Amino acid sequence: MSPVKQVFSNIFSVARRYWDTISYSFNAMSRILLFLILIPVTCRLNAQVTLRGSLENASSRDVHQLSLESWNADHWQQSQTLFLDPDFTFSLENVLLDPGQYRIRIWGKSAAWNDFIVADSAMADTALVFHLDYDHMDGGPAKITGSPANDLYFNLLSAQQKINRLKDSSTEAELATLDAAQSELNRQCLAVSARYRKTLIGDVALLLFQPRKSDYEGKEFVKKMTANEFAKAYELGMMPFNHDNILLHNAFLKRLNRYSNLFARDSAGSQAFIDGVMASRNGNDKVDGFLFRYLLDKMMDFKQEEGLTYLLKWYAPDCTDEAPLPNSIQNLVVALKTCAPGNIAPDIELQDTGGREVDLGEICAQNKLTLMLFWRSTCSHCKEFEPVLEKIYEKYHPLGVEVYALSMDQYEDDWKEDLKKHPTPWINTFIPLERRKEISLLYPAPSTPTLIALDQKRRVASR
């Protein structure tokens, strides 16, 4: 291995270990991107609903309020606060809620919640009356009166919870019980989906359906499959990819993540995973756009460069006005292709704290390896990574390594003030607001901190 490659390998080995410890990399920002992207997807005709209820077994606890949260893309988002009366009841009158999945959570306790659905027009409710029990707010469905859709939902989710508990604790002698329970849940799912076709509860039922080998009796090739082979072939079966209702419930993301876990995170496994997901597309632009963004997120989260390149080469939608991707993701796709490893990165000039123009190409030519660092003074992860980078810089700068930092702060004065208080030894530049769109098309930096390594000719070594 050449000295330059050895230096590069050592630097990114340290950086990657740091990234893994904070579980950050692109993942956090890509969640935010997905949330921002999917707001239009979930903005449907909303319903005016009254929420009333009581919380049992809370009298001896310090509980004063509950959080009403909605499922949005890949995370829960708080939408309302429910204040408890002295008798541990609550009431929220005539709230406008979009159809989708919601939960009521004990304030300050992330694991203490029950969920429910606000049905679409086919089974819309005007009032939901909750019967919550503090001791049973364990992530299962809420007990509700006045809602036929939630009666069905409670039965399906309760059955699934029971199956999950059996899976966690079952012995070989209990496998028959587990199989029978899954068979009964599948029967209920098919009955609900058939009766309430193309509704939210009907599509949620299909998300909960779990294919089994016994569903394919008589097919010899299925009998010969291992459990992993069968899951790869049929895990995503029965899911209504042609209905954007599936974007409104976290069961969809859970199924995709379960499918992801069947594959190794190497090049071959990543490509097979991508092909399997994209083969499930069924012509719904919203769902198809979500699947592409989901895979983009996964490949960056896995730091799987080969998988990312494969996804962009074969499945990236055209960056046009008709594409099912917002401008931010289209820009990211363009930048990822532009800065693919082996490509020559675009040259730019940005001003340092003294107002001097600093040319990236000149810096690269003067050093064996240049690390472009996208950061913000308000980014906690950037601050955590800074001492790690300082040690790297101290060790490798004498050997020809430079850092070209690009601040993504909103205000230039904040950036300058931070560097006065916490000076760093490398080159610091600022991206003016009017150039942010231009830079976003040139360099893939959807989150901070982001590192892109360039050689003396501005060739991308890694990103």
Image (tube, grey):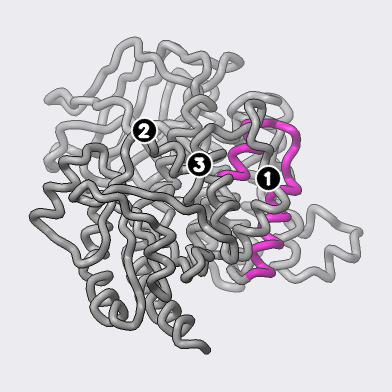
368 is within the stretch colored magenta: no
- Which residue is nearer to you in this view: 29 or 139? 29
Q: Which residues are magenta?
A: 267-293
Q: Residue at x 37, y 21 (%)?
A: 129
- The residue tagged 3 is 250
Residue depth check, mark 3 versus mark 2: number of the one nearer the observer:
2
Occupied quadrant, residue 116: top left
- The residue tagged 2 is 434
Q: Residues at badges 3 and 2 in contact (C-beta under 8 Å)? A: no
Which label's residue is closer to the chain start, 2 or 1?
1
Tell me the CA gap for discs 2 and 1: 55 Å
- Which residue is nearer to you in this view: 264 or 323? 323
Type of amino acid at the residue the image marks with label 1: Asn
Q: Is residue 172 above or below residue 103?
A: below
- Which residue is nearer to you in this view: 156 or 238? 238
Q: Position of residue 203 (x, y in %)?
A: 64, 33
Type of amino acid at the residue the image marks with label 2: Glu
Tell me the CA gap for discs 3 and 2: 38 Å
**Residue 186 marker:** 1
Type of amino acid at the residue the image marks with label 3: Asn
Occupied quadrant, residue 50: top left
Q: Residues within 10 Å of mark 2 (few under 14, many from 20)?
A: few
Q: Position of residue 277 (x, y in %)?
A: 68, 50
Q: Is residue 436 left or right of residue 336?
A: left
Q: Position of residue 439 (x, y in %)?
A: 44, 44
Of helix, strand and loop, which mostly describes the magenta segment? helix
Q: Residue at x 24, y 27 (%)?
A: 81
Occupied quadrant, residue 411: top left
Asked which secondary structure carries label 3, the reply is: helix
